[in-house]
Image (cartoon, rainbow, N blue to C red):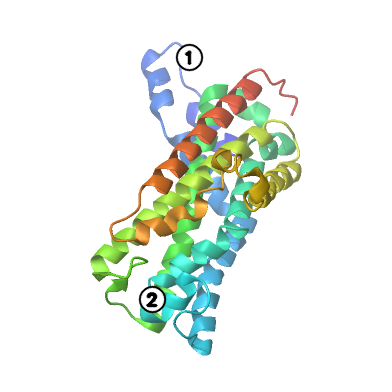
């Protein structure tokens, strides 16, 4: 089933000369809701969410069974036993390297290239749905998908962490303690920051998806882009390039767990996210607006 089906049904029989109906169609969220149902209904996406949720659970169980001593391993992992809220933070630091970008790559690959591959893109554009509106809807659905992915990791990690390690005041990376309520708010801020980075990556994927009719090719290309970015960040000889790389400040979310939070790297990361989203969003629009739709 394609997102075109309910949209076609929505406008079937509408008077093309009715200005009220035209405005209603423009303001309607039916296309977005249809796109989200399509994303949520795909079996591979459901399995992907299960994988994302499994990682924090596995981390929590492994730490519980091994009981690492304080001061050993990464900061988040070594702090898990003191507060269950460190489980989702540790899971995010692990999954940002591969699983979360892969989830976005799969969604972005399907966004335009998937429709073209299935032969439903032409039907979507004859609803009528303008190309700009369609592309904006696709990107909004990808941003929501990024939030979904992060939320699954955080919720699963929080439940597993609290169940196995309990709650209480959180020891910040600055060495001070904050209340459980403040700690939850910090985790929410971390989640939003990570989701913003993935949303920027989705803009890159959306652009790549307009270049091909093979969703797998778009997925692989975006993963190559992500992997090369991580490699470049780890090479000190090109440190001048690091501030311009999308992934450079992804791990800076740890600064939100200081007391007070350290905002400089967070602000830089958000500006880079915004720049990538705008630049690649415009590139996707420029490519898609003049693209010859053949399928």
Q: 10 Å neighbourhood of mark 1: few (<14), some, or many (≥20)? A: few
Marks 2/1 in contact by CB < 8 Å: the verdict is: no
Name the residue rendered at 74%, 33% in the picture.
212
Name the residue rendered at 55%, 28% in the picture.
279
Q: Is residue 10 left or right of residue 51?
A: left
The front one of 156 and 200 is: 200
Q: 10 Å neighbourhood of mark 2: few (<14), some, or many (≥20)? A: many
Q: Is residue 131 left or right of residue 165?
A: right
- Foreground tag (2 vs 1): 2
From this view, report whether residue 235 is shown above or below residue 277: below
Q: Position of residue 134 (x, y in %)?
A: 54, 29
Q: Quadrant of the N terminus?
A: top right
The front one of 28 and 85 is: 85
Name the residue rendered at 45%, 67% in the picture.
88
Q: Position of residue 161 (x, y in %)?
A: 41, 76
From this view, report whether residue 23 is shown above or below residue 251: above
Q: Position of residue 226 (x, y in %)?
A: 65, 48
SS at circle 2: loop
Q: Is residue 213 visible?
A: yes
SS at circle 1: loop
Label 2, label 1: how many angstroms apart (C-alpha)? Answer: 57 Å
Residue that mark 1 sits on:
16
The front one of 26 and 258 is: 258
Q: Which mark is residue 84?
A: 2
């Amino acid at each position: 089933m394609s997102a075109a089906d309910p949209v076609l049904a929505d406008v079937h029989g509408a008077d093309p000369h009715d200005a009220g109906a035209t405005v209603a169609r423009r303001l309607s969220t039916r296309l977005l809701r249809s796109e989200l149902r399509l994303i949520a209904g795909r079996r591979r996406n459901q399995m992907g969410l299960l994988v994302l949720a499994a990682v924090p659970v596995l981390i929590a169980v492994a730490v519980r069974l091994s009981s690492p001593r304080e001061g050993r391993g990464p900061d988040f992992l070594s702090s898990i036993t003191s507060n269950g809220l460190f489980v989702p933070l540790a899971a995010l630091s692990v999954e940002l390297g591969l699983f979360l970008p892969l989830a976005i790559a799969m969604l972005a690959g399907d966004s335009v290239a998937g429709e073209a591959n299935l032969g439903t893109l032409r039907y979507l554009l004859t609803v009528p749905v303008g190309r700009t509106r369609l592309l904006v809807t696709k990107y909004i659905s990808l941003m929501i998908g990024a939030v979904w992915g992060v939320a699954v990791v955080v919720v699963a990690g929080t439940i597993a962490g609290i169940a196995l390690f309990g709650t209480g005041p959180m020891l910040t990376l600055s060495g001070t303690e904050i209340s459980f309520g403040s700690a939850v708010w910090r985790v929410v801020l971390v989640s939003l920051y990570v989701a913003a980075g993935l949303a920027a990556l989705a803009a890159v994927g959306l652009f790549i998806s307009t270049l091909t009719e093979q969703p797998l090719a778009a997925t692989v290309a975006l993963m190559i882009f992500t992997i090369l970015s991580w490699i470049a960040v780890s090479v000190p000889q090109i440190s001048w390039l690091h501030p311009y790389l999308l992934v450079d400040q992804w791990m800076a979310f740890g600064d939100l767990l200081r007391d007070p939070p350290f905002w400089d790297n967070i602000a830089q990361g958000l500006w880079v996210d915004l720049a990538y989203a705008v630049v690649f969003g415009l590139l996707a629009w420029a490519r898609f607006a003049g693209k010859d739709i053949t399928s």
